[in-house]
Amino acid sequence: MTEPLNLDTTYEDLMAQKLAGVDNSLDKREGTSMIYNATAANSAETIQMLTTVKNFIDMVFADTSPREYLIRRAAERGLKPHEATRAKRKGIFNIDVPIGSRFSLDDLNYEVVERISQGQFILQCETAGNVGNLFSGQLIPIEYTDGLQTAVLNDVLVPWDDEEDTEDFRTRYFNSFESIAFGGNRADYKEKIGSLPGVGGVRVYRAWDGGGTVKLVIINSQYEKPSQTLLDEVQLTVDPLDHQGEGFGTAPIDHIVTVFGVNEPTIDVALNITYQSGWTWDDIKEQVQKVIDDYFKELAEEWAKANSYDEDHAGVVVRVSQIEYRLLGVTGVLDIADTKLNGVQSNIALGPESIPKRGVVSG
């Protein structure tokens, strides 16, 4: 009697099982016998059927489903991927320009959406995605504006967000089973605030200023300290300052919510580098700074992805060993030792509301 088939059965295993059930007195030689040829054709069809069935099963389970079917599965829990958003930038003009006026920079168009102060406005890129963050410079008016002499696209106020990555969405789906978002609990704040345009992560602290108060500390979607514009937008959405605790935002009534940005203390790095022959500090300085920036950004992303109460109250640690290990991969560096962070030869543990920012790097 042959073994029962499973979905991982291979063609070779199936052929071996079938031929084992045929009497050895009969011709079972590969390629020449009728028994072998008939069995091979049948086995190929069976394996194709098993593969199709396995693919169907993978589609309906969230850990293996492709994006289309993961979205359908997550919709049963009220979840959907975060959509791509458009960058908001600061525009500086010699006059107050009309709200709704449009300007171009190379192939991109920007619309004036809000006044900041005299001659300064918030502009929103009309194209979603990273491209809206990348370029600054002279703006060209799409329509004539009387009295306009200078128009400059400046700082990124609210960074773009790409459409949520499939694996990030899959992780968020599974996290939804560990903590149910409901009625202003911790998971509810994290889900709602984390889905706002420009927000990369949030930490939640209760009763920070007395009973009923909630403190939200956010990081932007580029894992940097958020602009005041982004802070103001999140505050307005969650709990407007002129109606705090009254339930005018997404926060439940009687929750007095205040939004803060993550702190960015600077970390000076003093390096003791042994150079490869012919190399100097000036040759490798820019690459060293990039390596440190990349490491600090990883720590900021780690901060942003805190998901539990304990993680919200834990700070990231800037480790000397990590900096030295990463810098050993820089061309021109032979060895490195005795690295100091802010003048001390030890790691730096930051507070739970802080991410590192590169200060002075010397080698």
Image (spheres, rainbow, N blue to C red):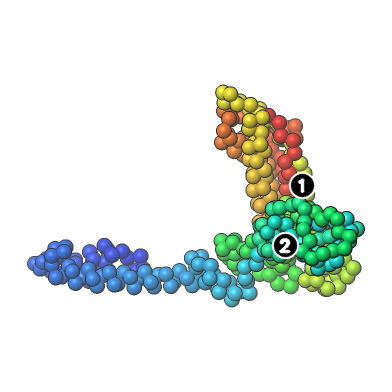
Q: Residue at 66% of width from left, 69% of height from top?
A: 180
Relative to 65, residue 334 above or below: above
Q: Nearer the viewer, residue 147 or 326?
A: 147
In this figure, which residue is indicated by the disc labeled 2? 109
Q: Quadrant of residue 267?
A: top right
Q: Secondary structure at mark 1?
A: loop
- Residue type highlighted by circle 1: Glu
Is 116 positioned to the left or the right of 332 in the image? right
Q: Residue at 22% of width from left, 64% of height from top?
A: 16
In this figure, which residue is indicated by the disc labeled 1? 264
Outermost bottom residue: 76
Whole-percent x, y for residue 227 in the image: 79, 55
Q: Give neighbour class at mark 1: few <14, some 14-19, many 20+ (Cα, 10 Å).
A: some
Whole-percent x, y for residue 159 in the image: 72, 57
**Labels 2 and 1 touching (C-beta < 8 A):** no
Q: Residue at 53% of width from left, 67% of height from top?
A: 67
